[in-house]
Image (spheres, rainbow, N blue to C red):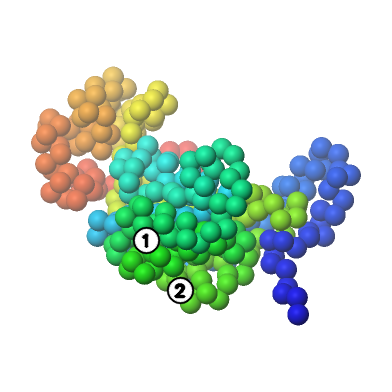
Amino acid sequence: MTSPLRSTERRNPRSADLDLLDPQRLVDRFVAEDAMVPAAVGLAREAIAAALVHIEGAFRQGGRLTYVGAGTSGRLGVLDASECPPTFGTPPELVQGIIAGGRDALVRSVEGAEDDPAQGAAAVDARGVGAFDVVVGIAASGTTPFVHGALERAAMLGARTVFFSCAQPPQTMVDLCDVVIHVDVGPELVTGSTRLKAGTATKLVLNMLTTGALVRLGKTWGNLMVDVQVTNAKLADRGERIVMEALGVPRASARDAIRAAGGRVRTAIVMLHDGVDAAQAEERLAAVDRRLRAIVGDPPPVQGDA
């Protein structure tokens, strides 16, 4: 008896005429399909929240988050991991991404790399995954052997495991993992091309996992990015605007304080608010688990419309 096709492999009846569409109708079809993704993600919100709890707990115990995936799934994991340090000032080892085929697979397809579960297990071993860590396996189709092997090894090592899929998860992963996130986006516009809706759903979920866990750890003040790393002109401007808005000071004062704080926006806010130097500001932050609300109070209200 033939097994039913996974949802990611089924043909989409709404795109059977895809190659006949003019540019405007083609774009309209993409827009209509992509609009379905947030609702599908919303149906998995309880599982996403459960995964977030595990990740927050790992961070609080000195553990790490490691994404594992192949192809688009792996690239999105690496992307999310790489964006945490500049956004939240986290060390690069806190959130990591493993992609089948290694670094070369980020820019070109490495054929067959995803088919070996032993390589997935070896990649987990190479990162030193342990009992305080969380490993999130990303497999849009649900069947990637590299991801399965990585999760099985992570579970053996005592790590918390999360499986993400846009197709019905295999029972082996349901039985193995602490959390299973299933986001059913239905068939793709181009049959089997999971870089489309499945890729969009993956990015949305990964955004929630890292951003949610790091916000819970106090890496923002309200919704202000107070641990941003001011490593370029755009981020320097953002940091200055945060200090200006927080305390009502001119840009020059904000810039000078950030410079004196070694680029740390959170520290600069305390320096200006309390009239202290950087070392004293750091001492005061350390005494309250670096939470600005305990020193400065609530962040300023949002001005204007969203």
**Whether residue 55 can be seen here:** no
Q: Name the residue beneath numbered marker 1.
A: 134
Q: Residue at x 87, y 51 (%)?
A: 17
To which quarter of the image does residue 54 belong? bottom left
Q: Residue at x 19, y 25 (%)?
A: 260
To which quarter of the image does residue 50 belong? bottom left
Q: Residue at x 36, y 52 (%)?
A: 126
- Say what secondary structure mark 1 lies in: strand
Closer to the camera in the image, 273 or 93: 93
**Whether residue 268 can be seen here:** yes
Closer to the camera in the image, 196 or 239: 196
Q: Amino acid at mark 1?
A: Val
Closer to the camera in the image, 258 or 145: 145
Q: Residue at x 11, y 34 (%)?
A: 279
User: What percent of the width, then of the height, locates residue 205?
Assistant: 51, 56
Q: Earlier in the sequence, mark 2 or mark 1?
A: 1
User: What percent of the width, then of the height, locates residue 70?
Assistant: 55, 52
- Please determine whether, in this image, residue 145 is positioned above or below residue 227: below
Q: Nearer the viewer, mark 2 or mark 1?
A: 2
- Please determine whether, in this image, residue 167 is positioned above or below residue 102: below
- Say what secondary structure mark 2 lies in: helix
User: What percent of the width, then of the height, locates residue 194?
Assistant: 65, 53
Q: Amino acid at mark 2?
A: Leu
- Please determine whether, in this image, residue 200 is positioned above or below residue 117: above
Distance between mark 2 and mark 1 Cα atoms:
14 Å
Q: Name the residue beneath numbered marker 2.
A: 176
Closer to the camera in the image, 239 or 99: 99
